[in-house]
């Protein structure tokens, strides 16, 4: 979502799996250092070292994720108060499903 495309693109599932397991990522040049740091920590192949995934490590647990500089100024307590809008194409699809 930050880059406008999926992080691991491939011609088929097998190619995508290979890119994931080899961590073949190419980040766009327009991303700032905080964003790059966040993405690198989220895409760490080792789950025990992945940001937000290690409850035993304060720097890598969910609070560590929320305190990353990328989220500076984010009020996580108020997120559930913000109305989310579904994309119009998804609303169209859901409406179509309801009529069938």
Image: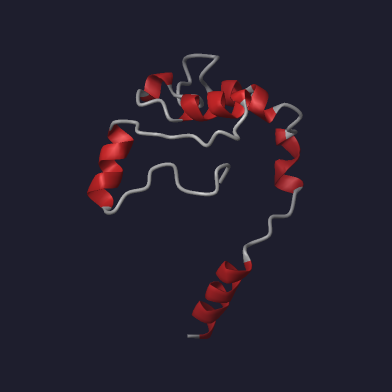
Residue at 45% in and 47% down: 6
The outermost residue toward the front is: 29
Q: How many marks?
A: 0
Measured as percent of width and height from the top left, residue 54 is found at 45, 21
Q: Which is nearer the eye, 35 or 81?
A: 35
Q: Residue furthest left?
A: 14
Colour setting? secondary structure
In the displayed structure, does residue 62 sit left or right of residue 45?
A: right
Q: Can you see residue 77?
A: yes
Q: Residue furthest bottom?
A: 100
**Residue 91 pos. (x, y %):** 60, 71
Residue 85 to residue 27: above or below: below
Identify which residue is drawn at 68% across, 60% down: 85
Q: Which of the two residues, 39 or 51, is positioned nearer the viewer here?
A: 39
Which residue is at a point 73% across and 32% down the rendered structure image?
74
The picture places residue 22, in percent across and down from the top left corner, at 29, 31
The percent coordinates of residue 66 (x first, y second) are: 63, 27
Can see residue 62?
A: no
* Residue drawn where x is 55% and y is 43% of the image: 3
- The image quarter in which residue 12 lies: bottom left
């Amino acid at each position: 979502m930050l880059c406008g495309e999926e992080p691991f693109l491939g011609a088929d599932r097998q190619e995508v799996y290979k890119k994931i397991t080899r961590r073949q990522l190419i980040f766009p040049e327009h991303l700032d250092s905080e964003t790059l740091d966040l993405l690198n920590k989220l895409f760490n192949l080792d789950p025990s070292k992945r940001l937000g995934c290690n409850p035993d490590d304060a720097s890598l647990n969910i609070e560590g994720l929320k305190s990353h500089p990328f989220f500076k100024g984010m009020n996580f307590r108020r997120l559930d108060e913000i109305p989310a809008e579904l994309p119009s194409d998804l609303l169209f699809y859901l409406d179509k499903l309801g009529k069938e």
